[in-house]
Amino acid sequence: MNLNANGLAGLRVMVIDDSKTIRRTAEALLKKEGCDVLTAVDGFEALAKIADQKPAIIFVDIMMPRLDGYQTCALIKNNPQFRATPVIMLSSKDGLFDKARGRVVGAEQYLTKPFTRDELLGAIHHHVSTVPSR
């Protein structure tokens, strides 16, 4: 699948993960595609940035300290301003329970780490058309 960068230029994407490696990898990949990338190490840091920066799509790790990915997703989806913002769960676990729990809190998709470039960009292309214009 050849995803062209033109459709992603200037798209504001948030990556929330306590792993510096995952954040840097996703950020480098997304910036190469022209995205405006925001990062956060946990849900608390992310929620403040989301309210201020209004990303078009959010990738959130499940296992994080303080506020995990499920709690973070639920808080995002409970806010009327961000209910329509796609949230993609990231996890090293590939269990049905985890995927189901992600759906319950409102996540649009679930990616298993390590994810590929095409999986990351594919998720954006799949969900970004459903994002309301700002």
Image (cartoon, helix red, strand yellow):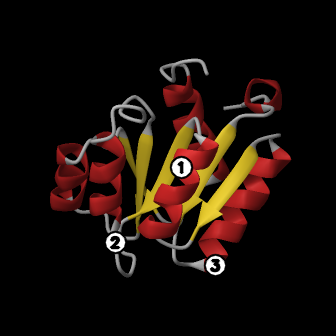
Q: Image quarter for residue 133?
A: top right
The numbered mark at residue 106 is: none
| Label 2 secondary element | loop
Q: Give me the C-alpha separation between circle 1 and circle 2.
A: 15 Å
Going from N to C along the chain, the mark reached first, 3 or 2, is: 3
Residue corresponding to mark 2: 67
Q: Is residue 5 left or right of residue 91?
A: right
Residue 5 image offset from top left, x and y in percent: 80, 32
Q: How many marks?
A: 3
Residue placed at 54% from the left, 19% from the top? 129
Residue placed at 55% from the left, 27% from the top? 128
Q: Amino acid at mark 1?
A: Ile
Indicate which label's residue lies in the foreground, 3 or 1. 1
119 or 34: nearer the viewer: 34
The numbered mark at residue 50 is: 1
Q: Is residue 121 left or right of residue 102?
A: right
| Label 3 secondary element | helix
Residue corresponding to mark 3: 20
Q: Is residue 117 left or right of residue 122?
A: right
Instruction: Please indicate, yes or no, whether residue 115 appears anywhere in the rendered image.
Output: no
Q: Is residue 101 left or right of residue 63?
A: left
Neighbour tally class for label 1: few under 14, some 14-19, many 20 plus, Cα within 10 Å = some
Which quadrant: the N terminus? Answer: top right
Q: Are marks 3 and 2 in contact (CB under 8 Å)?
A: no
Neighbour tally class for label 2: few under 14, some 14-19, many 20 plus, Cα within 10 Å = some
Indicate which label's residue lies in the foreground, 3 or 2. 2
Q: Amino acid at mark 2?
A: Leu
